Amino acid sequence: MSNDDVAPEKGGKMNAISAKLKYLEEACTKNIKLSSEIRAKLLCTESKEEKDAEKTPREGGQLNNIRDQLQDLLNVVNCANSHLVSVNKEI
């Protein structure tokens, strides 16, 4: 077996790993964005609770929105973890 026979296989493996790492980078960026949005909403919700404790339906809607965003964040993290495990197996 010559070096030419091995190179394409390694090249394909490197391309697959590179694609997965790119996905992980994008997932981390999305993770940071979602985390920042959630943090901002939590800070906003806390100040509203201090000012208007009686407006629970509106705050409940905000909390549902935050819960949905947390679920989205969890999905991104779980998917990124799956890709990371896959990259580790390929290496």
Image (cartoon, helix red, strand yellow):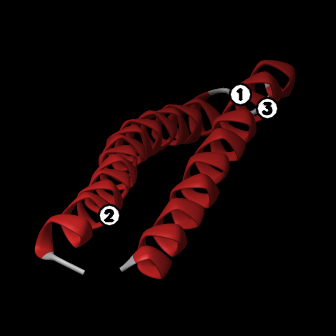
Q: Which residue is mark 1?
A: 65
Report helix, strand or loop for mark 2: helix
Q: Do callouts 3 and 1 mark residues in contact (Cβ within 8 Å)? A: yes
Tell me which numbered mark, 1 or 2, is placed earlier along the sequence: 2
The residue under label 3 is which amino acid type? Asn
Q: Are marks 1 and 2 in contact (CB under 8 Å)?
A: no
Q: Residue drawn at (51%, 60%), measured in percent from left and top?
A: 83
Disc 1 from disc 2: Cα separation: 46 Å
Check the picture and name the quadrant holding the N terminus: bottom left
Spatial separation of the CA atoms under disc 3 and disc 2: 48 Å
Q: Nearer the viewer, mark 3 or mark 2?
A: 2
Kindly identify which numbered label has been placed on residue 64: 3
Q: In the rendered structure, which amino acid carries the disc numbered 2?
A: Glu
Q: Residue at horizontal 34%, vertical 46%? A: 19
**Amino acid bearing label 1:** Asn
Q: Nearer the viewer, residue 82 or 1?
A: 1
Give the Cα separation between the discs numbered 3 and 1: 4 Å
Q: Is residue 26 above or below residue 4?
A: above
Disc 2: which residue: 9
Occupied quadrant, residue 45:
top right
Q: Horizontal and vertical percent for residue 91?
A: 36, 80
Regarding mark 1 in the picture, which secondary structure is present there?
helix
Q: Position of residue 55 (x, y in %)?
A: 78, 22
